[in-house]
Amino acid sequence: VKMKWLQLARRFSQGPGVPIAVPQPVRPEQVENSRLLKVALVGLPNVGKSTLLNRILQHKVSIVSPLPQTTRERTVGIYTSGKTQILFFDTPGVVSHEYGRRMRLARPLLVDARLSALEADIVATMVDGEQLHSYSHQPGAALNNLFPIDFDKMDAASAAELEQKKYILLVNKVDLLPPKKLSSFLCWIQESLGQGDGAKVSFSSVFPISALTGKHVPLLQSYLEEAAYPAPWVYPSNQRTDRPLPQLAQECVREQLFLNLRQELPYLLTQRIESVTENDDGSVTIRVTVFTKSNSQKLIVVGRKGEMILRITKGAEKELAMQVQRRVKLMLTVQEASRHMARTF
């Protein structure tokens, strides 16, 4: 039964129920002396990768919530300044295959960080400053052990390619550390740089930052801009993400499910875009179905007198309208996958 549900969930999440017209991609501007850089953001779940991306872009392109593993697939954030374009690959938190099976995570999600790291010019490993402070006091602690991707689970060619990449370490949430702890902690980081002979990963630079407050983030941005190399842009200068409108809508709904429901339940739900309708007044109407595994889950998502699904709908609608800068009407249907029972709000 569990296997049938997983197969059904993957089918529901793969695409819309009816054909949806996707706009043709716009060609980027031809800028003289243009520069480009690709940066992979990798790390354990809930360390702040999506928050950092939203901070750098000054625009929300990745959903965030207090729960781990909110990001389920790679998002490309596009930062353009002057003649420089930087592509940030925001990846799902790196977890073990055992954890992935327990949380019903699709296999592609578990390898997104690895593939993004292979595609990137710079691999930015993000860690939680509070957790790293505790780790620094353990015997044998070394910065080079913090890279979360296991080389032993890769083929030899990919592992060899990954070893040649440039790595930087982003120590997030340093604003939560008391000044004395932060000072001693930064000294340990400085002393640890370059240590660990034979390590497959060596960090060339370390940036203590706060993605939430923006502390030291401009220093990181300047570093990355200087690291960009001569190359044509990949996206137009006014584009901030590679995600089309239907996928943005799906992610906004997912974010509200995580923010409003119990800890386990959001991981068991899937969403499908049914239709996207462009209206004469310039607004857009999007129909989304949320699939539950059981009727009891459906009742929780709908809520008493429909209060929960209405809250989720309004929250996602507001968030999506802010992202796309236009009026949006979301119509959510909650349906039990096995019985095809539905209720629309």
Image (cartoon, grey):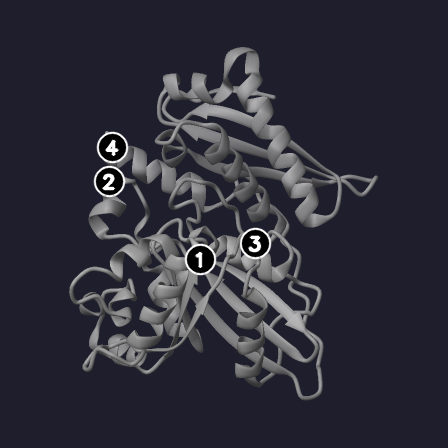
Q: Position of residue 245 (x, y in %)?
A: 62, 49
Q: Earlier in the sequence, mark 3 or mark 4?
A: 4
Q: Nearer the viewer, mark 3 or mark 1?
A: 1
- For numbered disc 3, what is the local secondary structure? loop
Q: Residue at x 61, y 21 (%)?
A: 345
Mark 2 vs mark 3, foreground winner is: 3
The N terminus appears in which quarter of the rendering? top left
Residue located at (29% from left, 40% from top): 103
Mark 4 and mark 2 residues within 8 Å of each other at the beta carbon:
no
Q: Which residue is mark 2?
A: 102
Q: Secondary structure at mark 4?
A: helix
Q: Amino acid at mark 3?
A: Thr
- Viewer-side residue, 200 vs 106: 200
What's the CA distance linking mark 1 and mark 4? Answer: 49 Å
248 up-or-down from 336: above or below: below
- Name the residue carrying label 1: 179
Asked if residue 235 shows in the view, the reply is yes
- SS label for mark 1: helix
- What distance separates the C-alpha of mark 3 from that of mark 1? 16 Å
| Residue type pointed to by label 4 | Lys
Identify which amino acid the numbered label 2 is placed on: Arg
Distance in Å between CA atoms under marks 1 and 2: 39 Å
Q: Which residue is mark 3?
A: 213
Q: Earlier in the sequence, mark 1 or mark 2?
A: 2
| 314 or 281, nearer to the observer | 314
Question: In this rendering, which labeled residue sits more in front, label 1 or label 4?
Answer: 1
